[in-house]
C-alpha cells in the first residue's frame, strides 16, 4: 500500500508443520513481517513547526499479527489483525498524545489507547511503553483481557509538510503466551 509520501505493507513466509494435527492435514503458519517507509520531513520544516507551536492530528490504518502459544490445543496459532490508528503530534513541545492503535479479527484484538511519547528533532518519535493502556483481548469464550507488559511503538513524520506518519508497534503479554506486532500509518487530517 502507498500514500503520496509513505508506503507500508508486510511479507509472509509459509512454514509447513511436520506433524498433522488431525491426521489428515498440516498446519500452515504464516509468520508476518511489517515495513513502513517514506520520505522524511525536512528538519528545517520541523523546526518551523516547533517555533510556531503547531499540532496536527493523524488518522489512518494499522495491520498486525498475533501469535498465541496456547491456541490450537497448545500447539500455538497465528492470527492476522487489521484496524485503525490515530495520534496527535505536538511539534511545539515535541510530544505525541492520544496515540491509539486498535486492530482486531473475530478471535483477538490489540488495543493501544491514549499512549504518549516524544518527537525527536529529526521527525522520528517513540511512544513510552508505560503510558496509556496496552491490552490484548481474546474473544473465544466471552472476552478475556490481558495487559500487555512488553510494549514498543516508534515511527517517523514524512512528506514535505509533515503530511503523514508511519511506524511499527508491538504489544506482548508474556505471562499469557501472546505476542503481537504490526505497523501503523496515517495522514494529516485523515485518510486510510
Image: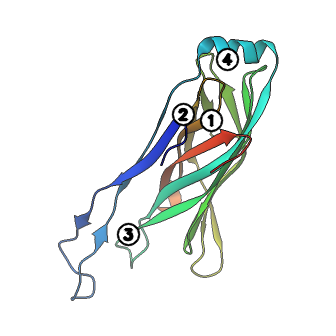
Q: Which of marks 2 and 1 is nearer the N terminus?
A: 2
Instruction: From the viewer's perspective, tell me whether residue 132 is left or right of residue 176.
Output: right
Mark 4 and mark 2 in contact (Cβ < 8 Å)?
no
How many numbered markers are drawn? 4
Q: Name the residue under label 2.
A: 5
Q: What element carries label 3?
A: loop
Residue at point 66% right, 48% down? Answer: 191
Q: Mark 1 points at which residue?
A: 164
Q: What element carries label 4?
A: helix
Instruction: From the viewer's perspective, tell me whether residue 80 is left or right of residue 33.
Output: right
Instruction: From the viewer's perspective, tell me whether residue 17 is left or right of residue 72.
Output: left
Give neighbour class at mark 1: few <14, some 14-19, many 20+ (Cα, 10 Å): many
Q: Which mark is residue 46?
A: 4
Q: Earlier in the sequence, mark 2 or mark 4?
A: 2
Q: Is residue 148 above or below residue 26?
A: above
Q: Mark 3 points at which residue?
A: 76
Residue 120 occupies quadrant? top right
Between disc 3 and disc 4, the foreground one is 4
Q: Earlier in the sequence, mark 3 or mark 1?
A: 3
Mark 1 and mark 3 in contact (Cβ < 8 Å)?
no
Residue 147 occupies quadrant? bottom right
Mark 1 and mark 2 in contact (Cβ < 8 Å)?
yes
Q: Which of marks 3 and 2 is nearer the N terminus?
A: 2
Amino acid at each position: 500500500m502507498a500514500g503520496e509520501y509513505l508506503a507500508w505493507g508486510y511479507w509472509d513466509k509459509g512454514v509447513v508443520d511436520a506433524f498433522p494435527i488431525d491426521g489428515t492435514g498440516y498446519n500452515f503458519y504464516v509468520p508476518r513481517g511489517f515495513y513502513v517507509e517514506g520520505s522524511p520531513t525536512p528538519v528545517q520544516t520541523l523546526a518551523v513547526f516547533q517555533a510556531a507551536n503547531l499540532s496536527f492530528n493523524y488518522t489512518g490504518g494499522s495491520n498486525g499479527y498475533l501469535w498465541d502459544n496456547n491456541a490450537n490445543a497448545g500447539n500455538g496459532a497465528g492470527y492476522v489483525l487489521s484496524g485503525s490508528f490515530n495520534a496527535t503530534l505536538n511539534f511545539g513541545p515535541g510530544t505525541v498524545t492520544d496515540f491509539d492503535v486498535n486492530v482486531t479479527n473475530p478471535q483477538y484484538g490489540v488495543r493501544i489507547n491514549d499512549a504518549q511519547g516524544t518527537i525527536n528533532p529529526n521527525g522520528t518519535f517513540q511512544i513510552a511503553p508505560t503510558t496509556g493502556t496496552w491490552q490484548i483481548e481474546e474473544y473465544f469464550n466471552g472476552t478475556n483481557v490481558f495487559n500487555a507488559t512488553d510494549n514498543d511503538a516508534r515511527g517517523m513524520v514524512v512528506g514535505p509538510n509533515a503530511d503523514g506518519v508511519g511506524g511499527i508497534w508491538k504489544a506482548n503479554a508474556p505471562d499469557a503466551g501472546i505476542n503481537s506486532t504490526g505497523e501503523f500509518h496515517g495522514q494529516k487530517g485523515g485518510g486510510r
